[in-house]
Amino acid sequence: MAVPWYPRSWAALAAALTLLLVTGCGGDDVPPPTAESSSPAPGPPSGTPAQPTGSAGPDGGGSVEEDIQAAVSVTNTYWQTHWSQLFTGDYSPPRVTGAYDGDTPGTPVCGDAPLPDDNAVYCPDGDYIAWDMDLMRWGHARGDAWVYLVIAHEWGHAVQNRLDAGLVDLARELQADCLAGAVLFGAAQDGTLTFEDGDTEELADALTALADRTPWTDVSDHGDASQRVSYFSRGARSGVKSCLPNGIQ
Ligand SMILES: [Zn+2]
């Protein structure tokens, strides 16, 4: 993914994502879950990350740090631009404290708990977003869309924290995926983000890699791969309002 925008067909992107819903995410080869969560989760393998096979078209070529910076900017710009069309009140961005290393002493804390290793978080206590750089580097090696998904998802939790309770879905992890889809595809429509060849596949890959092995049953669950792709795609197709309870299905 890249900024700025070079025109590309929105319809083609939507079609590609729909196709992925049908053909992708079989679930048989889902790697161990590495998703952000409030509980420690097994992270990306330490040591030598496994390189994906068949991944990625030509990426923007940015470093992981550059892509993170772009993802933060694109996501914040989307919410800043559209907030008043969607919700009452003024938009305020969360703080972005950014990179940490959950593997070393002195990891920042959220409340009383150290930030989780190989993970990413929105911390309501302090209203900030942070990520373990090991997670970002590991995912970025699979494709640059990874960091856009992680940041847009965590930003979705910050948005949830700003909404009336009635607008927050009980399945809040899946709602955060939906909001991430709405933001990334909405940004493409706004012209602040370019989808490159392979990006939609990378997004589906990332959602699958970060999924639970089992379907959503509890408020802390992330949902299985097909659920995560489904919620992300709903937001991508139909926007933020479709992510709200009783939204457009
Ligand atoms: Zn989450």
Image (cartoon, helix red, strand yellow):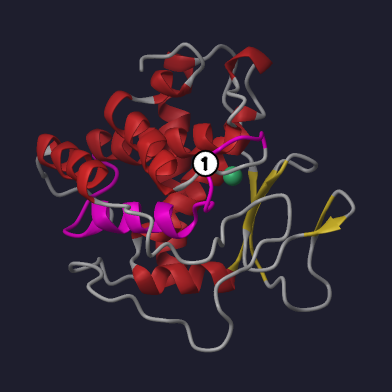
Asked if one can make out residue 70 in the rendered structure from this viewpoint, the answer is: no
Residue 192 x/y as whole percent: 29, 43
133 up-or-down from 182: above or below? below
Residue type for callout 1: Pro
- Left or right, 221 with reference to 178: right
Ligand 1 resides in the quarter of the picture at: top right
Q: Which residue is mark 1?
A: 215
The residue shown at (26%, 52%) is: 24
Q: Position of residue 87 (x, y in %)?
A: 52, 15
On screen, residue 7 versus residue 217, left or right, reads: left
Which corner quadrant holds the N terminus? bottom left
Left or right of residue 208, residue 43 in this image: right
Left or right for 208, reference 163: left
Q: Is residue 18 above or below residue 144?
A: above
Q: Is mark 1 within 8 Å of ligand 1?
A: no
Q: Is residue 120 magenta?
A: no
Residue in the foreground of this view, choosing between 126 and 249: 249
Q: Residues within 10 Å of mark 1 (few under 14, many from 20)?
A: some
The answer to whether residue 103 shows anywhere in this view is yes
Compared to 184, does 234 lie above or below?
A: above
Residue range highlighted in magenta: 191-219
